[in-house]
């Protein structure tokens, strides 16, 4: 893995390459990943208590944009996440996740407000939240209390990721296997933080669930430390069409975010609805609706997004799938008036561990008094989950 990572860094950081060499570098990364990680020895259960896993994702995206000074160009990235889990009993778990990455992908040159790929990239895994901590994403202990067959309470503390507990969605929640764009992975106006100190509670009561998160974040974009609070109420239903999940999420922070004038500090508050529903064996649908308070300076106030998922059963390959999604975001109190994202992808499972995704996005940002960038982003993603 170390040799692969070092090679990826060299390929992704070369300056002055022609487009052909850049494509060749990314193709080399994908080929190495495909050849090196189709080995089933990667998924390791050391014993019934200790297991090792993770995900490796290589992607190349090319943007063709208009009405902006940004260039038509392509970039690649290779994020790697390794996980270790130790379960001394069925009620206790110790877990840690390390994150590495080569390159920042198209995110560093994109003219759009929202990231074309929401994966943690090279800059995201260094000096995490201003804590002077690199690569260690999460490290926590969880204890589960069982009350009967259908009632349980899980309590987790340590370095956690709020998106592991809030704004879940069966069809729109994983940047390695589903949509790539930030707008279609989580609610971009929901500001749920990742990789910092906190605690989480998970209560399951038959078909009802409650998720609560409290975190202390080292630094926001204004350079201030703040507290985050999140609550999710969920209900799962089973019908003749299949499983459906309906969630209400409320997020808030302490008063540590500057207002639009940069003088006073305000808190952030957001309410989200996140639904997903199977529609038989082939189809599924999802939707998110959300509104963020605009006392603090924010880019994204209102969100409406949704889409469909089509199982590969339709063409005789059960592990494949096709997804199409759309998001409309009403700008907040900054210069952004609105943002639109449409994305379609088809994912081909190459084996039990590796999948290849072809992806296309259309993005458009509108500003009150500036150019309105718009254009297409074409992507190729190879991901290995083990």
Image (tube, rainbow, N blue to C red):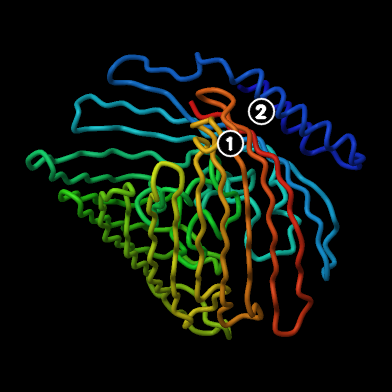
Q: Position of residue 188 (x, y in %)?
A: 52, 63
Q: Judge the density around disc 1: few (<14), some (14-19), many (≥20) Cα neighbours within 10 Å.
A: many
Quarter occupied by the N terminus? top right
**Which residue is depicted at the point 79% across and 39% down?**
13
Q: Tell whether label 2 touches label 1 (CB within 8 Å).
A: yes
Residue sitting farthest toward the left: 148
Where's residue 86, x and y in %? 31, 26
User: Relative to 43, is 138 above or below?
Assistant: below
Rendered position, 24 above or below 194: above
**Nearer the N terminus, badge 1 or badge 2?**
2
Cα separation, mark 1 vs mark 2, equals 8 Å
The residue that disc 2 covers is 5
Query: Does residue 18 appear left or right of residue 344 in this picture?
Result: right
Q: Label for residue 48?
A: none
- Please rate how many residues cluster around mark 2, counting C-alpha atoms within 10 Å: few if below 14, some from 14 to 19, many from 20: some
Which residue is identified by label 1?
A: 100
Residue 332: % across, % down: 56, 79
Q: Secondary structure at mark 2?
A: helix
Viewer-closest of 189 and 279: 279
Residue 359, position in %: x, y? 67, 46
**Quadrant of residue 373 in the image?**
bottom right
Horizontal side of residue 157 vs 22, given as left or right: left
Residue for point 70% across, 68% down: 364
Count of residue discs? 2
Say what secondary structure mark 1 lies in: strand
Task: Please tell me which residue lies in front, 380 or 307.
Answer: 307
| Residue found at x 50% / y 46% | 174
In the picture, measured across the screen, residue 212 lies left or right of residue 301, that is left
């Amino acid at each position: 893995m170390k040799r692969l990572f070092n090679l990826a860094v060299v390929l992704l950081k070369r300056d002055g390459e022609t487009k052909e060499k850049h494509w060749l570098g990314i193709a080399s990364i994908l080929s190495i990943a495909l050849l090196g990680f189709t080995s089933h020895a990667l998924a390791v259960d050391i014993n019934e208590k200790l297991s090792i896993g993770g995900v490796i994702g290589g992607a190349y995206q090319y943007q063709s944009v208009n009405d902006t000074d940004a260039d038509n160009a392509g970039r690649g990235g290779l994020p790697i996440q390794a996980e270790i889990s130790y379960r001394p009993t069925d009620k206790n778990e110790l877990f840690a996740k390390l994150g590495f990455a080569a390159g920042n992908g198209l995110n560093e040159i994109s003219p759009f407000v929202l990231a074309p790929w929401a994966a943690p990239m090279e800059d995201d895994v260094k000096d995490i939240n201003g804590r002077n901590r690199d690569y260690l994403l999460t490290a926590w202990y969880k204890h589960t209390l069982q009350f009967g067959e259908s009632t349980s309470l899980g309590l987790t503390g340590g370095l956690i990721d709020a998106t592991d507990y809030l704004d879940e969605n069966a069809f729109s929640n994983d940047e390695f296997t589903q949509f790539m764009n930030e707008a279609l992975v989580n609610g971009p106006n929901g500001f749920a933080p990742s990789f910092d100190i906190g605690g989480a509670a998970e209560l399951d009561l038959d078909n009802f669930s409650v998720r609560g998160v409290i975190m202390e974040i080292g630094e926001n974009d204004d350079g201030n430390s703040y507290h985050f609070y999140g609550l999710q109420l969920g209900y799962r239903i089973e019908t003749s069409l299949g499983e459906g999940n309906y969630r209400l999420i409320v997020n808030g922070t302490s008063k540590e975010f500057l207002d639009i004038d940069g003088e006073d500090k305000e808190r952030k508050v957001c309410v989200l609805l996140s639904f997903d529903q199977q529609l038989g064996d082939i189809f599924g649908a999802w939707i998110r609706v959300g509104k963020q308070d605009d006392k603090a300076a924010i880019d994204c106030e209102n969100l409406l997004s949704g889409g469909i998922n089509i199982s590969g059963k339709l063409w005789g390959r059960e592990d494949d799938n096709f997804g199409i999604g759309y998001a409309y975001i009403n700008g907040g109190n900054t210069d952004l008036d609105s943002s639109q994202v449409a994305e379609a992808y088809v994912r081909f499972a190459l084996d039990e561990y590796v999948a290849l995704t072809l992806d296309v996005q259309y993005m458009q940002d509108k500003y009150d008094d500036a150019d309105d960038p718009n254009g297409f982003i074409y992507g190729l993603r190879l991901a290995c989950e083990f």
